[in-house]
Amino acid sequence: METSATPTHCPYCALQCGMNLTPAPDGTVEVTERADFPVNRGALCGKGRTAPAVLASSVRLTSPLVREGGVLVPATWDEALDRIAEGLSSIRSAHGPDALGVFGGGGLTNEKAYTLGKFARVVLGTSQIDYNGRFCMSSAAAAGIKAFGLDRGLPFPLEDIPKTGCVILVGSNLAETMPPALRYLTELKDNGGTLIVIDPRRTRTAEQADLHLAPRPGTDLALALGLLHLVVAEGRADEEYIRERTTGWEDARAAAMAHWPEYVERITGVSVPQLREALRLFCEPEAAMVLTARGPEQQSKGTDTVGAWINLCLATGRAGRPLSGYGCLTGQGNGQGGREHGQKADQLPGYRKLNDPAARRHVAEVWGVDPDSLPGPGRSAYELLDALGTDIKSLLLMGSNPVVSAPRAAHVEERIKSLDFLAVCDVVLSETAALADVVLPVTQWAEETGTTTNLEGRVLLRRQAITPPEGVRSDLEVMHELAARLGVEKGFPTDPEEVFEELRRASAGGPADYSGITYRRLAEENGVFWPCPTPSEEAAGAVGAGTEEAALDVPHNPPHDDGTPSVHPGTPRLFLDRFATDDGRARFVPVLHRAVAEEPDAEYPVLLTTGRVVAQYQSGAQTRRVDELNAAAPGPFVELHPRLAERLGAAEGDPVAVVSRRGRAVAPARITTSIRPDTVFMPFHWPGEGRANTLTNPALDPTSRMPEFKACAVRVEAVEAVEA
Ligand SMILES: Nc1nc2c(c(=O)[nH]1)N[C@H]1C(S)=C(S)[C@@H](COP(=O)(O)OP(=O)(O)OC[C@H]3O[C@@H](n4cnc5c(=O)[nH]c(N)nc54)[C@H](O)[C@@H]3O)O[C@H]1N2
Ligand SMILES: Nc1nc2c(c(=O)[nH]1)N[C@H]1C(S)=C(S)[C@@H](COP(=O)(O)OP(=O)(O)OC[C@H]3O[C@@H](n4cnc5c(=O)[nH]c(N)nc54)[C@H](O)[C@@H]3O)O[C@H]1N2
Ligand code: SF4
Ligand SMILES: [Mo]
């Protein structure tokens, strides 16, 4: 294993680019092109290319740490694990299981996410578990379930994009957040298709567009409704499709009719001719797609906003047809799989609902526990973080850095500090780990095997390429050891493939059915799209048909003599025959525009929106440890329009303060005409004075519980004026 190239995948974003890793004699690891993986065909962004830098033991944790006299000091694994087990049991005895919080991450492999959910429910008995994916694609997930009966980010592979006629990209800066995927949009244009980008900023992605619409942040819902109004007014609705494949059109149509183009122009700042042009480009070709990312989703009305874009697709017959559809560009490495297997507050593996009695029975049987012993749904991510130090007394954190990434971060930081006990598993001493009572150093991507599910719903095998440094253990080993110390000796294997075999059974018959997938298939087929049930289950046409044990005993068989496959091929394209609703029809959801939770006023006259830059990843815990990436993106900044800068008297590079009702952040000004004059933008990758999340508003979407990361009211000040 240590000498030849190992084909594997990047640790970072949901594209999960393929790469080869080769260990060098000096202990470093070389990344080389892996051309056989179709999603990126060898291309990588700078983060993926430099990812091995974070494997070096000089930048990471290699010993457990425990807090002694206020400071973190090295400890043995036994000391550290004992301390966590004691901390959690004493809190549970005093306050009950729901005093134990658990917070996971969409970067964790399927095996880890599955085990974490099981650990919370079976070992701790707590309902108080959620994860950072709530901050990511949860609004799109909620809208997808409402409309289609199923949430898989993209219902088609990326390779379909260049073949469609028009793509509307809503609030995605793909050129910076998934650079190798830009190729699909370039090919679309080369093939004669058109690209429409909707973003308040003229981003590198918007520069590629045939048409760029720059709405005010937080007004995408009105924009989509205005387009739907025009669909009706211009007679562009596909009546036959609406009749045959959907329900609920009348109500959705009536709601849209209240959104006149001129009214929408006033709300969004996008002119009526631009709206008409966008609709023409979308409707003229035979096929078209709408893709959303965090821009429209991270809003306190994100679910309705995505619902409005789906309505547009349904009204024009552009869903569940070849080369047409709505898709969400999921973000984290395992952003898709991480939301399917039970680290979400209301969820059991296989994308089952925790409050569904049949789901509880099925999963409890796989886990060998009484269904009644499983707790009910808990709180959403922000609500959980907000409750720390009140009824939640301890937190076990794996795969997130909320001190930097949570909304209203100063408050969240203060809540975390008020805990009786905090345990963090991480590869580096993140800003959140630095606050812990116990820190456990864990293995990462190249040092362990596991599966992830990329933004297309393609389940992938990440292979171990190198031996981990001495002193670290895997997250699975941590949960195994803690379970044993808390009295659960069985059911927490440390071998990822063994966990995956159990996950197959737990997911069998659920919406995200992985039961027909094996490690062997993943290796041989370069990924398999879910749902992938076992053939017998499919033949029976029912979920959970037959005894699962027997049904799952599928070797990697060659096709039958008549050529039919003996294993399910997986499902690259969803909904072509029917949607995943009871009646097989997609549901229109009637939605009306509403304002952002915090409208600008005299005191806070400007809108702040937040997002990413190409060279840093998320809270920066990993990428801020890579010299090359820091050179490219050394720190935070405030992007603002020359007119706003002039009013402040701020020149390029001058420190400016951005102040919201939650707090104040200071960062250098970056002056550009590419942003609306009424809006400022900050990336959220840094802690400290320039932390964007000091400012953000935790107003939550009523359905998805997504915070409003993309719009809050602020004022911008020249720093001298304040300090003087
Ligand atoms: N370099 C890098 N790549 C990443 C990540 C990273 O941290 N760094 N993170 C990964 C993850 S987890 C995710 S979720 C994805 C996110 O990927 P994206 O969604 O592409 O990233 P963002 O920069 O958060 O937001 C995209 C765009 O939304 C725009 N926007 C802001 N407000 C609004 C609005 O109200 N409406 C509209 N329409 N647009 C708006 C912003 O100007 C921004 O250009 O990226 C993944 N890839
Ligand atoms: N203002 C603003 N805030 C945002 C967003 C925004 O657009 N604007 N976007 C939101 C979104 S979409 C997301 S996804 C979140 C992401 O924000 P976070 O949840 O903070 O995500 P990361 O920074 O990726 O944190 C992952 C942590 O887990 C560690 N880690 C990596 N691999 C492993 C592993 O295998 N095991 C363990 N135990 N640890 C590991 C990393 O070192 C890091 O400390 O931020 C959200 N916050
Ligand atoms: S685009 Fe995403 S998956 Fe690909 S190399 Fe960059 S961070 Fe890694
Ligand atoms: Mo994300």
Image: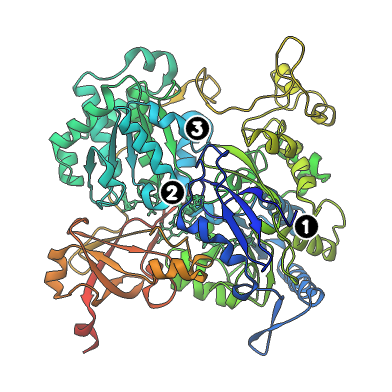
Q: In which quarter of the image is residue 571?
A: top right
Residue located 19% across and 40% down the image = 264
Q: In which quarter of the image is residue 517?
A: top right
Residue 211 can be seen, yes or no: yes
Secondary structure found at label 2? loop
Q: Is 350 placed left or right of 87 in the picture?
A: left
Label 1 vs label 3: CA separation?
A: 38 Å
- Work out whether mark 3 precedes mark 2 in sequence or the reverse, and give the earlier one: 3
Three-letter code for the amino acid on which mark 3 is drawn: Pro
Q: Do the residues labelled 3 and 2 touch (CB within 8 Å)?
A: no
Residue located 77% across and 45% down the image = 497
Q: Is 608 placed left or right of 181 in the picture?
A: left
Q: In which quarter of the image is the C terminus?
A: bottom left
Depth check, front residue: 5 or 99: 5
Q: Do the residues labelled 1 and 3 touch (CB within 8 Å)?
A: no
Three-letter code for the amino acid on which mark 1 is drawn: Val
- Residue 157 image label: 3
Give the residue at mark 2.
178
- Work out whether mark 1 precedes mark 3 in sequence or the reverse, and give the earlier one: 1
Residue behind label 2 places its C-beta within 8 angstroms of ligand 3: yes
Depth check, front residue: 189 or 252: 189
Question: Badge 2: how crowded within 10 Å, few (<14), some, or many (20+)?
Answer: many
Secondary structure found at label 1? helix
